[in-house]
């Protein structure tokens, strides 16, 4: 049962409404007296409504509901330094033109307070009679904000009511203008983290990336797309706190998060842009998911863990250890190679097989090979989706290599159609291509071929992609398939006959999920392994693994890993000839993958194979890391990624580092020892370290009791992996630091187990 306070006061003229001191909540049990978290106060020069608990205070202009402040009450830190921004902007299509509406100019602003239970309240802000541009039409909007006792996070919702003569095209909500920490000096240290991308420094002025000259900004966080999760976090850079902004949408509907400096470069704006799915006659629209916003005490890591808890609570994404659909051969894979050299005949295929067998012998353990050019055309972005027949000898190669311990994973592309193919005409495939707002085709890689983007929401394209996967499995014997462009930033589709509503909604993610589910159900292979490009929550529950080939930023904060590491198997990193030729560069890249829990390598065969005396040190390092990864699966495969340990005492080094495919060769400053911390499913703590230099390192790592779930002064059994084996567990008391010796060019894992060793 819920009861409102009965407060609904027009505030266009009343700026200091008197609020009730308490409200009775009636239900099956006795009435509970609840003090509403809503008061009034003057703040930053504005008469404000103050919606607050003991952790968070939200200040809104009492007359217009403009954003005045978001405050961490316990630390007295404000996160709006330039108040007065509107909370939303609505874009409508009317009479063939786009018009906008927001709270400005509304005829009335009213609110009411609703108590859901003794521990939560919802503030409803109503913007009535908002002008839609110069059309003479109006709309109404209701912003709902829910606050729970003891929780710093506010949950936002939005409902729009309009007449049938306008179509709602996109919604910017919430718009958080004038952001920045009030903490002294934070303007020089603050940053934004979007999982999967480099850290974005100086958000109030330049929003520059720590990886220079890449032309990337936070507005590239499109969903579903290359972005890993539906969140961004702001930190003051001093460890005191920041802001958390996340979308809680299990269906990955079309949207994007963006941030950019305000005009005066003293603050920044962050917002979420939504694409409503509906029809032109719809009389209203409700945001079909929640937006979470609030102050964070801590930094990017604390924000990531908030997102992780709320993501797992949705129930779809779950840890790998709880899944039963992943075969052992894939989970036990530690090394990947890949190749994009054309294969044109059975003799060439036989030579290719022999080459991969030599790598298998040198590596001394099974590995997987990501095979690109296996189809008759053997040219990238050419002839898609007309793959078959495959290059002669392809099916035989799959079987022969599997028997030798090499798994071939063939490639297909999920979004591209070469319009020069006869099938384009005979299938009348243009009916199922995605369309832009003018009705035109959406080109993709047009500089290579006359390729267009196909709409994943159509039955035609789903059937065709399923047919390709089934043929690979049932005719050629593949048991793994790579689905390229799965996280491609596909253009919005304006086609009207595709069966998806309007331009928004979840049709893109739903279409790809349908292809994956049908392949798993119809290919006749129980343990079919499907992998996709990039890594995100969108398909983490369905895919066996996700390629992070573009994850080459050595200074990117591992927010993605802190959220999703134990819920998906990541593999790869783009490795160029220069990375393979230099031991320090090679060790640096493999070491970063190793500590982040990825399957290692994705070594480009056309860039080098690591065979021969010149590559003996690199091959030895790779073998050592792969062996250690296999021995520490409970951390590096199944473990939850914790806050990385502080190994700054070991110093840094500068190495050559290829940023391909994002950028060229550069010099990067990295730690001499890569380090990560993991919590195994049985709650053991794993300290994962790899020395990427020629000098042995003796470390004294400060113990982080808060984030590692261990106690300084507690007694643990300690066991170290060194030199290819686990040492006998030794019982010791954990001090303020953890002493670890890491040999040159080698991995080390320290396990701390509380309780008896069985």
Image: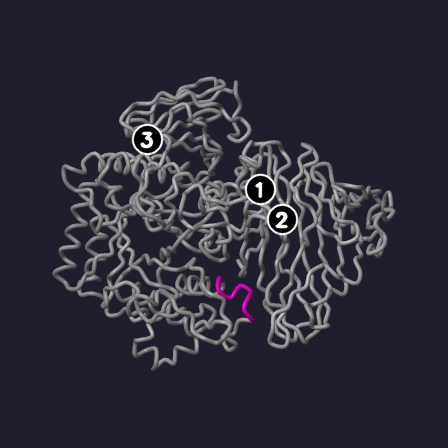
Q: Residue at x 65, y 65 (%)?
A: 100
Res. 469 image quadrant: bottom left
Q: Earlier in the sequence, mark 2 or mark 3?
A: 2
Tell me the colour scheme of the image: one colour
Residue pointed to by mark 2: 292
Q: Where does residue 601 sit, x and y in percent of width and height? A: 30, 44
Give the Cα separation between the discs numbered 2 and 3: 39 Å
Q: Which residues are magenta?
A: 502-509
Direction from residue 616 to residue 42 in the image, left or right: right
Q: Which mark is residue 747?
A: 3
Q: Earlier in the sequence, mark 1 or mark 3?
A: 1
Res. 391 image quadrant: bottom left
Report the mark closest to the observer, 2 or 3.
2
Direction from residue 726 to residue 222 in the image, left or right: right
Q: Where does residue 103 sit, x and y in percent of width and height? A: 72, 59
Instruction: Identify the residue at the far left of this view.
Output: 347
The number of callouts visible is 3
User: Can I make out residue 155 in this image?
Assistant: yes
Residue pointed to by mark 1: 306
Instruction: Identify the residue at the far front of this view.
Output: 264
Most common secondary structure along the magenta stretch: loop
Q: Are marks 2 and 1 in contact (CB under 8 Å)?
A: yes
Q: Where does residue 174 sit, x and y in percent of width and height? A: 64, 53
Report crowding for label 2: few under 14, some 14 to 19, many 20 or more residues within 10 A (C-alpha): many
Secondary element type, mark 3: strand
């Amino acid at each position: 049962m819920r009861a409102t306070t009965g407060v609904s006061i027009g505030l266009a003229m009343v700026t200091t409404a008197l609020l009730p001191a308490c409200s009775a909540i009636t239900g099956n049990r006795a009435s509970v007296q609840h003090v509403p978290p809503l008061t009034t106060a003057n703040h930053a020069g504005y008469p404000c409504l103050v919606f607050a608990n003991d952790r968070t205070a939200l200040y809104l202009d009492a007359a217009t509901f403009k954003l005045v402040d978001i405050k961490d009450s316990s630390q007295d830190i404000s996160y709006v330094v330039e108040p007065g921004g509107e909370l939303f902007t609505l874009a409508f299509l009317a009479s063939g033109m786009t018009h906008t509406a927001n709270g400005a100019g509304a005829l009335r602003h009213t609110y009411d307070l609703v108590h859901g239970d003794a521990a939560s309240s919802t503030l409803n802000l109503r913007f009535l009679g908002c002008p839609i541009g110069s059309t003479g039409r109006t709309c109404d909007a209701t912003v709902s904000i829910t606050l729970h006792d003891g929780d710093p996070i506010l949950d936002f919702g939005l409902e729009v009511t309009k007449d049938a003569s306008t179509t709602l095209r996109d919604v910017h909500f919430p718009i958080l203008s004038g952001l920045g920490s009030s903490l002294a000096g934070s303007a020089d240290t603050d940053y934004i983290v979007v999982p999967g991308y480099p850290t974005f420094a100086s958000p109030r002025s330049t929003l520059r990336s720590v990886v220079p000259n890449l032309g990337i900004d936070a507005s590239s966080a499109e969903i579903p797309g290359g972005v890993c999760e539906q969140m961004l976090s702001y930190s003051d850079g001093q460890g005191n706190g920041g802001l958390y902004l996340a979308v809680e949408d299990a269906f990955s509907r079309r949207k994007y998060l963006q941030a950019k400096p305000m005009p005066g470069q003293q603050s920044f704006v962050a917002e979420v842009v939504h694409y409503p799915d509906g029809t032109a006659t719809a009389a209203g629209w409700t945001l079909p998911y929640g937006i979470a916003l609030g102050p964070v005490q801590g930094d990017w890591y604390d924000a990531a863990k908030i997102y992780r808890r709320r993501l797992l609570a949705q129930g779809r994404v779950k840890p790998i250890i709880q899944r039963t659909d992943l075969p052992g051969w894939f989970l036990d894979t530690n090394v990947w190679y890949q190749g994009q050299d054309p294969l044109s005949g059975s003799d060439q295929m036989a030579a290719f097989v022999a080459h991969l067998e030599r790598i298998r012998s040198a590596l001394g353990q099974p590995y997987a090979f990501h095979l690109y050019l296996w189809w008759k055309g053997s040219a990238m972005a050419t002839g898609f989706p007309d793959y078959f027949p495959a290059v002669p000898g392809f099916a035989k190669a799959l079987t022969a290599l599997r028997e030798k311990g090499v798994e071939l994973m063939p490639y297909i592309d999920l979004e591209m159609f070469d319009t020069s193919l006869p099938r384009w005409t005979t299938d009348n495939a243009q009916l199922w291509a995605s369309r832009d707002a003018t009705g035109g085709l959406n080109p993709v890689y047009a500089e290579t071929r006359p390729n267009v983007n196909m709409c994943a929401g159509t039955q035609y394209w789903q059937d065709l992609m399923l047919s390709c996967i089934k043929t690979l499995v049932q005719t050629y014997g593949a048991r793994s398939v790579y689905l390229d462009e799965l996280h491609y930033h596909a253009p919005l589709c304006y086609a009207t006959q595709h069966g998806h509503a309007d331009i928004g909604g979840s049709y893109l993610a739903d279409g790809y999920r349908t292809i994956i589910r049908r392949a798993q159900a119809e290919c006749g292979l129980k343990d079919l392994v499907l992998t996709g490009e990039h890594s995100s929550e969108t398909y983490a529950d369905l895919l066996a693994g996700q390629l992070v080939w573009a994850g080459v930023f050595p200074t990117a904060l591992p927010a993605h890993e802190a959220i999703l590491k134990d819920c998906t198997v990541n593999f790869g990193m783009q490795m160029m000839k220069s990375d393979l030729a230099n031991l320090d560069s090679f060790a640096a890249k493999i070491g970063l993958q190793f500590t982040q829990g990825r399957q290692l390598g994705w070594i480009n065969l056309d860039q080098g194979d690591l065979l021969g005396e010149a590559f003996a040190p690199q091959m030895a390092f790779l073998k050592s890391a792969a062996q250690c990864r296999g021995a520490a699966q409970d951390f590096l495969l199944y473990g939850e990624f914790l806050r990385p340990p502080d190994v700054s005492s070991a110093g840094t080094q500068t190495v050559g580092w290829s940023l391909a495919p994002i950028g060229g060769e550069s010099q990067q400053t990295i730690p001499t020892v890569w380090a990560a911390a993991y919590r195994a499913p049985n709650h053991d703590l794993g300290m994962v370290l790899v020395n990427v230099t020629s000098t042995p390192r003796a470390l004294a790592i400060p113990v982080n009791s808060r984030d590692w779930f261990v106690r300084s002064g507690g007694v643990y059994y300690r066991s170290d992996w060194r030199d290819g084996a686990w040492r006998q567990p030794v019982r010791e008391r954990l001090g303020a630091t953890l002493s670890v010796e890491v040999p040159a060019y080698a991995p080390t894992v320290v396990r701390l187990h509380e309780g008896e060793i069985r």
